[in-house]
Structure formats: C-alpha cells, structure tokens
Image (cartoon, helix red, strand yellow):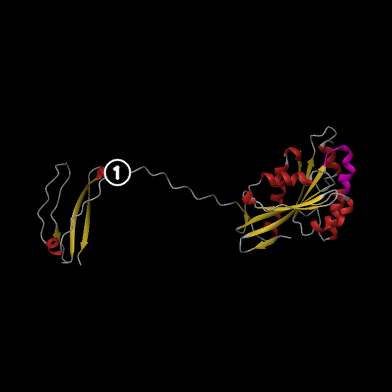
Amino acid sequence: MVLFNAATKELTAKVVYYGPGLCGKTTNLQHVYDSLPQDGRGKMLSLATQTDRTLFFDFLPIELGTIRGMKTRIQLYTVPGQVFYDATRKLVLRGADGVVFVADSQSPMLDSNRESFQNLIDNLREQGADLETMPHVIQWNKRDTPNALPVEVLEREVNRFKTPTFEACATRGEGVRETLTGIAKLVLKHLSEKYGGSLEAEPPPPPRPPHLPKMEDSKPLEVEELSGGEMLEEIEELPSDGKAGTRTTALHLSGHTSVVEVPVVLDRSLFNGEGPVEIKLKLYLK
C-alpha cells in the first residue's frame, strides 16, 4: 500500500524480493545498497534468524520521474526463504506494491523455485491480492553456474504470467540494477494509472548563466559637483573632439525650470555598430 507524504511531496512504494532460500535475495539488496549514494538512501535494517535474515532499506531514485509532482521513494524488503518462516514472509509481504521473484537457475533448485512461486501466489491471495495483476518481475539468478538450466526451461516452469524477466549474477552485480529498474518502472506505471495521475519526467536542472567576458579595467568617472545656480546657467557649446560624425550641443533649459536636458553623443562603435547614438539625460533639480 503506497504511502503519501504531503510535507516532503513524496510517495513511498514497497517492493519485496521473494524466492527460495539462498537464491540471492540478500545479495541483490546488498549490492543495490552499496551502489547508492549515501544521501539518497536510508539506513539498512536487518532482522536475523538462525539460518536467514530479512533486510530492509528505502531509497529515492532520481531518474524514474514523478507522479503528480511527487517523487517516489521505494522501500526494498527481502523475506526469509525457508518454509518454516512462512509467517514472517506473510508479514513482510503485506502491503507490497510490487514483487521481485529471485529464482535460482541451478538445475537441482527447479522444484524449490516452483514451490516458492506458488507460495507467493497463495500468500498474496490470503491478503486479497492477485500476483497476475500486481507489478512483478522475475530474476534468473546464478546464470554463471555450470548446472544452470536454459532460460527457456525456467520461463516455461516458473513464469506462469509471462512477466518481464532478467538474467543475473548477483554476486558480481550483473543484472541487479536492470532488475530493480524493471520493477520500479512497473510500480510507478501502476500507481500513476491507479491514482489517475501521469508519470512525468524529472525537470531538467536550470541552465547555467552564459560565461560573460571579462571587462577591461577602466578608470572611474570623475564627477564635478555643481550648485543649483551653476546648473541653471547657460553653458557654452563644448569643443568638438575632432572625430567624424561627432557633434556637441549646448546645455539648455526646457519649458519647466526644474528640468535640464543634456544632449549626450556617444560613438556607436561602443555598441559594435556604425554612426553616433544620441542620448538625452534629464537632470531633475531639487
């Protein structure tokens, strides 16, 4: 059962790794945990028994998108594989949004794979869930062993609902990330359809500002402070600097005695153009 956190704008989905004993469930989670950045994962909790253990941690994948603007945090659980821990398996399986069934590819483990898969179906049915309609994938683990069965045989004997499958060697980390990405995408798609939203890609980070060229050092402007009376006096025409197309104009008063218009002529070459640009500055006297 998905959990919503309005404060952090996150929804939390639960994914359970299921399968027979010693099939590689713990190895999968350990590899995933070790490969995640520390700031994107929670603390790993372990519930150990005499022969097996249950692991749990959550993490926040950043590449899988959002639902209605909410990021998805995924909780990963393993269950003990031994048959006599069936009560624990039922407890961990409760409220799952998706399942990864980890199968042992070795030939002697075929019966154990079939029994564990049927046990998964039965336990979900007791909780009112149907594996056929629940997001789930199958991982064919231990593909590196010499007695590994062909994938075609495993597909026929175990994959009853024709769900996506992934070949893996969890001890070397092969296929672990692909399996996790596969179930995560199925879970997010299921949640978006169930709650009427749509899966949206993460917005790209804002672009960096363009690199501005370094300005050449220049001397600060020198400003001469004038009194109000001096500002209102007529100023004679300024001498020309001799450049072509450059002119100067005398300071004059507008119709309002509190405003002085000062024509200023700038060379357009300053703006990478041609010809002069005339700018008028209005000085408001108090």
Q: Nearer the viewer, residue 229 or 13?
A: 229
Amino acid type, callout 1: Asp
Where's residue 271, x and y in %? 28, 45
| 150 relative position to 261: left or right | right
Q: Which structural element holds mark 1?
A: loop
**The residue stretch that appears in magenta:** 104-115
* Residue beneath disc 1: 217
Quadrant of the snapshot with the C terminus: bottom left
Where's residue 112, x and y in %? 88, 45
Where's residue 77, x and y in %? 76, 52
Quadrant of the snapshot with the N terminus: bottom right
Tell me, yes or no, whether the highlighted magenta stretch contains residue 219: no
Disc 1 crowd rating (10 Å Cα; few below 14, some 14-19, many 20+) is: few
Q: Residue at x 89, y 48 (%)?
A: 115
Q: Residue at x 87, y 52 (%)?
A: 119
User: Is residue 77 visible in this depiction of the protein?
Assistant: no
Asked where in the image residue 232 lies, by quadrant, the reply is bottom left
Q: Residue at x 87, y 51 (%)?
A: 118
| 145 relative position to 208: left or right | right
